[in-house]
Image (cartoon, rainbow, N blue to C red):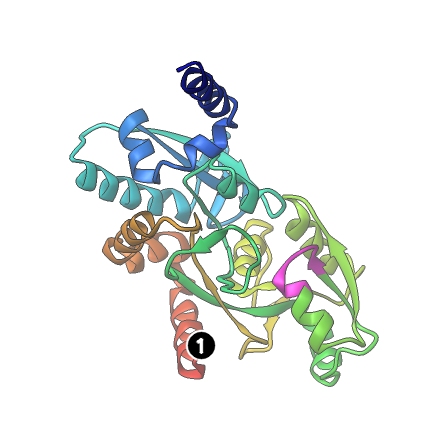
């Protein structure tokens, strides 16, 4: 009898001593939201037009519009009219940790879908496709077009991105200058303006967004090259691994979202270019 009591006490102490995150991970995302009434979402602050801070320091962008569709889908699934929403600022460094540690239920930004990513996360279906391009000054066009291996060109990249990996592997003769932080892309584009680097490489849509914010005239003073991108990039939400019910719900939200209207709202006149890029990438089967 005493042994049974002792075993029960030891078992209880073991359970109480478990880290809270381990206990929480026994819950699915939807179970947690049902229990707390709170949806926790990660969003970038420096990735216009997907996520950024507006003049009032509020989050804005495509991801905010997509979040509305996700929350509507959650309400429908849980049969709840009201849910609280909390937004967390994410970045290139912490985006995966926020999801792995269940600080957020999903993260939205220009996240390239990478099935081989060695992390305890997974991706939703894609909601956007773009391609890797270079932003250059128009007076540098002939120099760069004639230099197909980019030898001795100084090209800016964001540190820790797939773009950096791509250029390092495919163009080893290029001099890569790394930028980092939420202002990294902006500083890289400014370096092109100031002739400090020959080009800045990133996802085409992000280059367009940042160039627009900087008041640059694409097609006049600046160009995006090559017209056919160096590779194709598909964006998806970052989700916790091993929660198929949550992934299915998020994928349903993507399918239900009015993506053409959302993109037209944010991209306006360049929407045809976005469609052409998407059609090219789909035709390439990338």
Q: Does the magenta run of residues contain 160?
A: yes
Residue displayed at 48% across by 27% down: 20
| Secondary-structure class at tag 1 | helix
- Of residues 13 and 104, the one drawn nearer to the viewer in this rendering: 13
Residue found at the far left of this picture: 79
Q: Quadrant of the N terminus?
A: top left
Q: Give the vertical position of 275 relative to 128 (above or below).
A: below
Residue displayed at 58% across by 56% down: 211
> Which residue is label 1 attached to?
281
Percent coordinates x, y for residue 244 in the rendering = 33, 52
Start and end of the magenta stretch?
A: 157-164
Percent coordinates x, y for residue 2 in the rendering = 44, 14
Residue found at the far front of this picture: 1
Whether residue 72 appears in this view of the structure is yes
Percent coordinates x, y for residue 262 in the rendering = 32, 53
Q: Give the vertical position of 229 relative to 245 (above or below).
A: below
Q: Does the magenta run of residues contain 272?
A: no
Q: Quadrant of residue 217?
A: bottom right
Q: Quadrant of residue 248?
A: bottom left
Number of dots carrying numbers: 1
Residue displayed at 50% across by 24% down: 14
Whether residue 56 appears in this view of the structure is no
Residue found at the far right of this picture: 152
- Of residues 124 and 109, the one drawn nearer to the viewer in this rendering: 124
Q: Give the vertical position of 97 relative to 171 (above or below).
A: above
Q: Quadrant of residue 222?
A: bottom right
Percent coordinates x, y for residue 51 in the rendering = 48, 45
Residue displayed at 40% across by 82% down: 283
- Of residues 100 and 174, the one drawn nearer to the viewer in this rendering: 100
Q: Is residue 14 left or right of residue 67?
A: right
Q: Residues within 10 Å of mark 1 (few under 14, many from 20)?
A: many
């Amino acid at each position: 009898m005493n042994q049974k009591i002792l075993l029960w006490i030891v078992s209880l102490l073991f359970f109480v001593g478990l880290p809270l995150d381990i206990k929480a991970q026994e819950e699915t995302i939807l179970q947690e939201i049902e229990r707390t009434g709170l949806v926790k979402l990660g969003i970038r602050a420096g990735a216009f037009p997907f996520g950024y801070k507006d003049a009032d320091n509020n989050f804005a962008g495509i991801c905010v519009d997509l979040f509305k569709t996700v929350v509507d889908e959650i309400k429908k699934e849980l049969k709840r009219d009201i849910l609280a929403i909390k937004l967390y600022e994410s970045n290139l460094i912490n985006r995966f940790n926020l999801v792995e540690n269940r600080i957020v239920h999903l993260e939205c930004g220009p996240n390239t879908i990478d099935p081989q990513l060695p992390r305890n996360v997974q991706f939703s279906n894609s909601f956007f496709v773009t391609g890797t391009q270079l932003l250059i000054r128009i007076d540098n066009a002939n120099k760069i077009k004639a230099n197909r291996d980019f030898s001795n060109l100084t090209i800016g990249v964001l540190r820790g991105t797939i773009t950096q990996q791509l250029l390092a592997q495919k163009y080893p003769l290029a001099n890569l200058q790394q930028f980092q932080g939420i202002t990294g892309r902006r500083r890289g584009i400014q370096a092109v303006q100031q002739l400090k680097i020959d080009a800045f490489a990133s996802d085409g849509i992000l280059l367009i967004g940042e160039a627009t914010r900087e008041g640059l005239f694409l097609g006049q003073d600046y160009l995006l090259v090559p017209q056919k991108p160096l590779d194709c990039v598909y964006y998806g939400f970052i989700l916790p691994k091993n929660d198929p019910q949550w992934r299915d719900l998020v994928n349903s939200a993507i399918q239900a979202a009015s993506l053409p209207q959302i993109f037209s709202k944010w991209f306006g006149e360049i929407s045809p270019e976005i469609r052409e890029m998407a059609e090219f990438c789909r035709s390439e089967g990338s």
